[in-house]
Image (cartoon, rainbow, N blue to C red):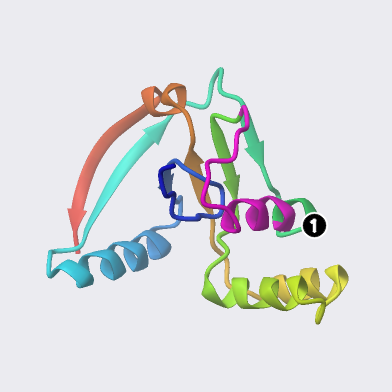
Amino acid sequence: MQYIRPLDFGAGFYVTTLRKQAKIWAEKKTKRYGEIATLNKYGLNLSGLNIKEFKAADESWINFVVLNRNTKEIIKHDYDVIIGEVANDQIFDSIDLYLRNIYTITRLIQELKTKAENNQLCLASLKALNNLTFKGSDFL
């Protein structure tokens, strides 16, 4: 069995539409390796793709993230692209309190509404990756 690092929406190529968030991700990853942080820019044609969009950090989003984060196997689904919020460490701490029955689902959703704006798109299929167009890079 191959180990899969547990990510919010499972295996895939992750991007964001928020430059500030992309910059944070790039700097965090490259700091570890002593490289120069780079932002790659892409266009994505969503036509013909099966898209799952979580409009908010609600109960269905929580269940999907927990399912993906609590496994070492690839969760099977038919989505080409999954769109929704990021369960960063701060958010996942709140989810952990829910999983330990300290927070109710109502309390958890209320907690999540106070977190900073973020988003992620997980390109989870070859079809989605084929709809991705490289637009250039910026060095930070």
Q: Nearer the viewer, residue 26 or 89?
A: 89
- Badge 1 crowding class, 10 Å Cα cut-off, few under 14, some 14 to 19, many 20 or more, is some
Is 75 left, or right, of 137 in this rendering?
A: right
Q: Quadrant of residue 33?
A: bottom left
Identify residue for label 1. Answer: 59
Is 109 left, or right, of 116 in this rendering?
A: right
Q: Nearer the viewer, residue 128 or 11?
A: 11
Secondary structure of the residue carrying tag 1 is helix
Specify the amino acid type for callout 1: Glu
| Residue shown at 54% from the left, 35% from the top | 81
Q: Residue furthest top?
A: 48
Quarter of the picture containing the N terminus is top left
Please state the extent of the stretch shown in magenta in the rendering: 62-78
Q: Nearer the viewer, residue 88 or 11?
A: 11
Q: Residue furthest front?
A: 1
Name the spot of residue 103 as percent of width and height, x first: 81, 78
Q: Quadrant of residue 28?
A: bottom left
| Residue shown at 45% from the left, 51% from the top | 16
Name the spot of residue 78 as percent of width and height, x first: 62, 27
Q: Nearer the viewer, residue 45 or 69?
A: 69
Q: Residue furthest bottom?
A: 102
| Residue shown at 58% from the left, 72% from the top | 116
Quarter of the picture containing the C terminus is bottom left
In the rendered structure, does residue 69 fall within the stretch colored magenta?
Answer: yes
Q: Quadrant of residue 108?
A: bottom right
In the rendered image, the vertical position of residue 63 relative to residue 88, given as above or below: above
In the rendered image, the vertical position of residue 15 relative to residue 139, given as above or below: above
Name the spot of residue 94 as percent of width and height, x first: 68, 76
> Tag count in the figure?
1
Name the spot of residue 25 as percent of width and height, x first: 35, 63
In the rendered structure, does residue 20 fall within the stretch colored magenta?
Answer: no
